[in-house]
């Protein structure tokens, strides 16, 4: 087989593993809570540790690959991801697991940042379009089968095996990369922007830390307030540094193009407004409705299947319909879907979510496919790598901040709802512990400590508190998507696109754009 097809195999196998792992993790969260005695905050960090390192390293990893060699960096990234997967499977506690997920994020950023560049250097002409098409199809299959496959693994084996299965796949990808892939470099590669990398990474970490800590400590504490202030100061320093840097990791001049800015808004909004919500939907399906992991994964096929089908339709429309007339209506459809999912009550069945999940999936498919072109299609070819990396970074920032911010709102409303429900009953003093139980997956033990005559009241209060909190964050996600729809319609302009803009857009970007986000 020609070496270029081996390159496609190595990259396809690696990215399939990454996207599959992203969708699988959310389905496993309730089992992770139970076995590792994890709190709700711990679960947020399991997701956000990965998204943080991925967002922080995407642009830097791309520069490293251009300078040191894409084959070498891709192989090293795959090895780091595989080792991180092993450590995740061996985790003895939530902190261990979060740190191992961060290691996965380091490897994942390196693989994502290098994958499309490897394909672009290996393929030319018609074969390049075929390669990107195959790559997109592989990614779509990973998104579609992830929830079900994850549910099967968790139900039949253990949540640890969602990480262990990566080990043989990763080893195979490394072997193919080392022996069958040609090396490529960029002669005029940018120098590493160390100051930009450090200020951006620490600012993002401080922001997420402050948002997550606020759900248990309140917004007025020194720890939370200090974290948010540090984040704001470092973001200002980052912007100043990028304006003055000779070779910045984020070229701020790109923001002068309205279409590029619209693409960044879309990238952030689809992650923060839709995919970050899936963590809470999974917890609802398993912790409140009592579904198993495989039952949850099967039900999420309503969303992932709709994304898969709509993405194919959008792919055929991209050459005929203006980009904003796909992205903007897509966000409207997502917003309507999220509104339809609201209205949950203590007696609601999972079928209440079906229309909303299906609509949200259709909208996400319409947004995802043309979104890449808003990054790479409005810049010169030599800046396409940075532009695509910035867009992908905003997706990961959306996941990280969405999970943290929505989690803060969710827990605050859950506590208030439980406190209100219990009122002046003998359980009023237990409102806080029941709220912690509802978010941390320890409802059973909490109810066991409740007097038998009052357990029904406690269980109902906890259930109602959970659905009230979920209804609130579904509304927030819907509003964010509607705002994105208007912004994208106003900002994205067809005249900003350069000739041949769709070449790179045919391939996926590092989105984790399926159930589970990153």
Image (spheres, helix red, strand yellow):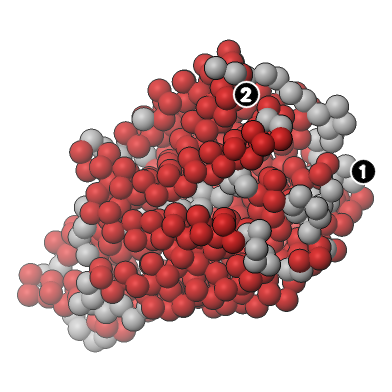
Q: Residue 255, labelled with which disc? A: none
Q: Residue at 20% of width from left, 83% of height from top? A: 425
- Viewer-nearest of discs 2 and 1: 2
Which numbered disc flags the more N-terminal residue, 2 or 1? 2
Query: Separation of disc 2 and disc 1 at Cα?
Result: 35 Å
| Camera-side residue of 475 and 424 | 475
**Could you classify mark 1 by the number of other residues whose Cα lies within 10 Å: few (under 14), some (14-19), or many (20 or more)?**
few
Residue 52: tell me if it is visible: no
| Camera-side residue of 432 and 288 | 288
Q: Which residue is mark 1?
A: 246
Query: Left or right: where does residue 487 sit relative to residue 174?
Result: right
User: The residue tagged with tag 2: helix, strand or loop?
Assistant: helix
Q: Position of residue 153 (x, y in %)?
A: 27, 39
Quarter assignment of residue 233 = bottom right
Query: Left or right: where does residue 503 sit relative to residue 509?
Result: right
Q: Residue at 71% of width from left, 58% of height from top? A: 374
Query: Left or right: where does residue 20 sit relative to residue 288?
Result: right
Q: Residue at 74% of width from left, 23% of height from top? A: 184
> Seen from this angle, which residue lies furthest top?
179
User: The residue tagged with tag 1: helix, strand or loop?
Assistant: loop
| Vertical comparison of 50 with 398: above or below | above
Q: Which residue is mark 2?
A: 4
């Amino acid at each position: 087989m020609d070496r270029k097809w081996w390159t496609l195999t190595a990259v396809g196998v690696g990215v399939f593993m990454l996207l599959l792992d992203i969708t699988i993790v959310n389905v496993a969260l309730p089992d992770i809570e139970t076995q590792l005695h994890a709190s709700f905050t711990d679960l947020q960090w399991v997701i956000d540790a990965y998204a943080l390192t991925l967002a922080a390293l995407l642009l830097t990893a791309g520069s490293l690959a251009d300078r040191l060699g894409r084959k070498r960096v891709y192989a090293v990234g795959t090895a780091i991801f595989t080792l991180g997967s092993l450590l995740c499977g061996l985790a003895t506690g939530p902190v261990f697991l979060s740190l191992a997920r961060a290691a996965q994020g380091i490897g994942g950023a390196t693989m994502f940042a290098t994958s499309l560049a490897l394909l672009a250097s290996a393929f030319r002409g018609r074969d390049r379009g075929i390669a990107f098409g195959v790559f997109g199809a592989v990614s779509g299959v990973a998104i579609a089968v992830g929830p079900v496959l994850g549910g099967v693994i968790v139900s039949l084996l253990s949540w640890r095996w969602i990480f262990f299965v990566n080990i043989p796949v990763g080893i195979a990808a490394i072997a193919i990369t080392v022996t069958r892939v040609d090396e490529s470099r960029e002669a005029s590669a940018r120098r590493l922007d160390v100051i930009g990398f450090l200020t951006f990474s620490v600012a993002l970490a401080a922001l997420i830390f402050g948002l997550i800590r606020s759900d248990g400590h309140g917004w007025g504490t020194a720890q939370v307030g200090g974290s948010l202030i540090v984040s704001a100061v470092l973001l200002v320093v980052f912007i100043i540094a990028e304006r003055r840097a000779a070779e910045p990791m984020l070229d701020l001049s790109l923001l002068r193009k309205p279409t590029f800015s619209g693409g960044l808004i879309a990238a952030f909004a689809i992650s923060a407004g839709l995919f970050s919500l899936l963590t809470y939907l999974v917890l609802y399906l398993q912790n409140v409705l009592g579904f198993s992991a495989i039952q949850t994964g099967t039900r999420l096929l309503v969303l992932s299947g709709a994304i898969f089908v709509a993405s194919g339709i959008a792919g055929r429309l991209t050459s005929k319909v203006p980009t904003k007339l796909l992205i903007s209506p897509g966000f409207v459809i997502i917003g309507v879907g999220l509104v339809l999912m609201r209205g949950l009550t203590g007696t609601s069945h999972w079928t209440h979510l079906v229309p909303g999940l299906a609509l949200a999936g259709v909208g996400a498919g319409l947004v995802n496919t043309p979104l890449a072109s808003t990054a790479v299609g409005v810049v010169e070819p030599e800046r396409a790598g940075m532009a695509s990396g910035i867009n992908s970074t905003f997706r990961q920032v959306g996941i990280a901040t969405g999970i943290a911010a929505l989690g803060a709102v969710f827990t605050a409303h859950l506590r208030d709802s439980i406190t209100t429900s219990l009122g002046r009953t003998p359980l009023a003093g237990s409102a806080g512990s029941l709220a912690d139980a509802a978010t941390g997956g320890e409802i059973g033990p909490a109810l066991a400590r409740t007097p038998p005559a009052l357990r029904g009241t406690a269980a109902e209060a906890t259930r109602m508190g959970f659905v009230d909190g979920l209804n609130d964050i579904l509304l927030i996600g819907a509003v964010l998507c509607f705002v994105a729809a208007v912004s994208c319609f106003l900002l994205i302009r067809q005249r900003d696109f350069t000739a041949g803009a769709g070449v790179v857009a045919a391939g996926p970007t590092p989105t984790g754009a399926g159930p589970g986000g990153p």
